[in-house]
Amino acid sequence: MESLTKNRQNEETLRKMVGRFFHPLELQSYKELTEGYFNVAYEVTLSSGEAVILKVAPANGIRVMTYERNIMCAEVQAMEMALEHGGIPVPKVLGYDDSHTICESSYFFMEKLDGNSLHERKDAFTQEQINSIYEETGRIDKEINRIACPCFGYPGQPEFQGEDWYMVFRRMLEAGINDARQGNVDLKIPVDELLRYLERDKDFFAEVTEPRLVHWDLWDGNIFVSDGMITGLIDWERSIWGDPLLEVGFRIHSDNLFFRNGYGIKEFTKSQERRSLWYDIYLFVLVSLECEYRKYETIDMYQWGTHMLTTLWGKLRC
């Protein structure tokens, strides 16, 4: 996927990055990994023959959505929290540099997982294997959500953190709406009225009192598999300290019985249903912005996002 945010590096810079963390080993070869949408990523082969993964944040001055600020820091932190917790298949961070001395952006190396993404290899599996993978994803996601966090909000942005989940979530949604205004993106729904509905539903958020680690982006492209088994989960950059119901497995477009079985939630309470609706809205506000902020080659993402928003708006008013 081509995106304005992908900050490609030349070979000389890549050699310096390798030297920073793997000396006396050197860069032997590299290739860009093209499946991602935001950061540029490379598979780097060292002179020892070992392959590692390098991710580089967008260049300074590139316009990003509010929630995407400093998310490489959030990713590294979330991966380290998951490793420390145990029982969660996550690649090890092999080096993180936010000094901006070698490159104008932050970057980090991590171990290369076995296998490929489920998105890439799904056709190679039986339906039974796919269902088993989703069930295991639900089980793992439950473990992720057991990890307690210091407060609610975006890990890399103190201004979007707090002790009251409703107030933090409201600021998150307002930031997305403001990004739409700044980018002249028509969300196809009345956003001022939307926020009045959110205030009306404030009490539904009151039961969320313990901030938990939320991966938030566990779609097929971020689930690595080999021989029908999960080998690891990647792309923790959009992690949130919040309500576990934010997870992709509970979203309207990806609700999956096998994921729910693995997670251990088959039915929502009234309060959970309402919060889940708001998390759908939050997600599709952001989805609707991607074409403008990343300059994709088509507007398919915008059309899908705003279609979903108008559908959700109708559900909200019922």
Image: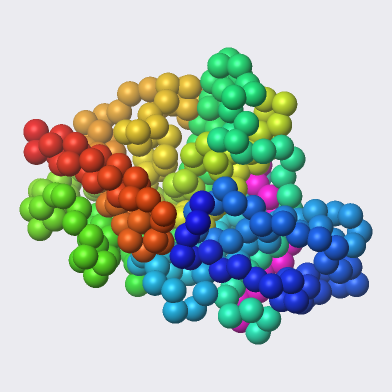
Nearer to me, 246 or 281: 281
Number of numbered tags placed on the structure image: 0
- What residue sits 10% from the left and 52% below the top? 190
Q: As drawn, is 141 to the left or to the right of 289?
A: right
Residue at the front extreme, as displayed: 297
Q: Is residue 91 magenta?
A: yes
- What residue sits 57% from the left and 75% below the top? 105
Position of residue 257 measured from the top left corner of the image (x, y, whole percent): 42, 21
Q: As drawn, is 206 to the left or to the right of 210?
A: left
Query: Which image quarter is the C terminus in?
Result: top left
Q: How is the image coloured?
A: rainbow
Q: As drawn, is 22 to the left or to the right of 111?
A: right
Residue at the bottom extreme, as displayed: 101
Position of residue 302 measured from the top left corner of the image (x, y, whole percent): 30, 49
Magenta residues, as a range? 89-100
- Determine if residue 43 is in view: yes
Nearer to me, 229 or 34: 34
- What residue sits 44% from the left and 79% below the top? 61
Position of residue 69 measured from the top left corner of the image (x, y, whole percent): 43, 69
Position of residue 280 measured from the top left corner of the image (x, y, whole percent): 29, 42
Q: Is residue 63 magenta?
A: no
Q: Is residue 38 above or below residue 137?
A: below
- What residue sits 91% from the left and 59% below the top? 48
Q: Quadrant of residue 244?
A: top left
- Determine if residue 99 is in view: no
Q: Is residue 227 above or below residue 152?
A: above
